[in-house]
Image (cartoon, grey):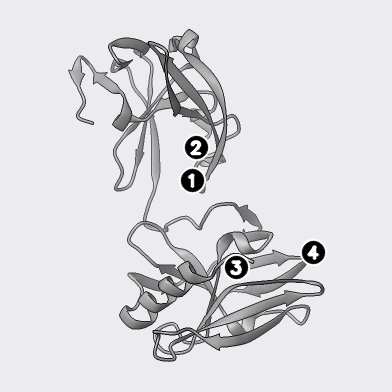
Amino acid sequence: MPSNSDLAKLAQKIALEGPHKYEHTPRRVRGLFNGNYAFDTIGAFHVWEHPYYPQFYVPSSSFSSSATLTKTHDIDGTKGGASFARLTVDDKHTERVVIFNTAPLKDLVKIEFKAIDQWFEEDVPIYQHPKDPYKRIDILKSTRSIKVALDGVTVAETTSPLFLFETSLRPRYYLPPTSIAWEYLSKSDTETYCPYKGKANYYNVTINKKEYKDLVWYYVYPTMESGPIAGHLCFYNEKVDIWVDGLREKK
């Protein structure tokens, strides 16, 4: 069983200091565990454990008759404000669960996102974490020129990029596949998930016999809201040299 020390540290911080932010969400939230919906609620909360994105916390009263939620012991350093718990459905259980015992999160349950089989927001599966309701993505066609270089070698150049603007993040430039110098790229086995864009795959880039892992990502089947970026490639701005209309961008 994995150590709960990281979960305990998070619970200590939230029990003593409170979350960064929290608010009720009217969205229906369900969790599938061992073939059953362990919980089903319209009383969930978005809880920002840090400033970047929220997690779902669900009421302890929302667990179904097929699931057993049992407090195991109080978490040291929380002054009784949080307890570890065990979620059991038939012959499967997880202890990556915390119940908060005091305001403002009293009787809300945090289940580590990957500890159950599938989360649903309404009838839509979510794979990484809930979307932040205060963030949005805009994908805009542009005729501004984009040039990408690494170690003095141009690896992409186009005058038909897509600019992706995501709230509070730097712009990303998605480039058509025909603008890429493919001789420098090789497929990576890495996959990641973004709640706004979907499952990403990656390429490594090799320049002057040096390989840069996972420097480029792309979406074969992005989410509907991010559909225009399908098949386009994006380089990490922070790790390459990029010129936008001839002006070099700061890393």
Cα–Cα span, label 3 and label 4: 19 Å
Label 2 SS: helix
Using the rendered image of the protein, determine whether residue 122 is visible from the camera's viewpoint: no
Mark 3–mark 1 contact, CB under 8 Å?
Answer: no
Cα–Cα span, label 2 and label 1: 7 Å
Residue that appears at 23% across and 31% down: 251
The location of residue 167, given as percent across then percent down, is: 32, 47
Residue designated by label 4: 35
**Badge 3: residue crowd in 10 Å (few <14, some 14–19, many ≥20):** some
Disc 1 residue type (three-letter):
Tyr
Label 4 SS: loop
Q: Is residue 11 left or right of residue 144?
A: right
Using the rendered image of the protein, determine whether residue 182 is visible from the camera's viewpoint: yes
Q: Which mark is residue 122?
A: none
Residue designated by label 2: 226
Up-down relation of residue 235 to residue 123 (above or below): above
Cα–Cα span, label 4 and label 1: 26 Å
The answer to which of marks 4 and 1 sits earlier in the sequence is: 4
**Badge 4: residue crowd in 10 Å (few <14, some 14–19, many ≥20):** few
Up-down relation of residue 187 to residue 25 (above or below): above
The answer to which of marks 4 and 2 sits earlier in the sequence is: 4
Residue designated by label 1: 196
The answer to which of marks 3 and 1 sits earlier in the sequence is: 3
Residue designated by label 3: 28
Mark 2–mark 1 contact, CB under 8 Å?
Answer: yes
The location of residue 159, given as percent across then percent down, is: 34, 13
In the image shown, does 220 or 19 lie closer to the viewer? Answer: 19
The answer to which of marks 2 and 3 sits earlier in the sequence is: 3
Disc 3 residue type (three-letter):
Arg
The location of residue 68, given as percent across then percent down, is: 72, 82
Mark 4 vs mark 2: in front: 4
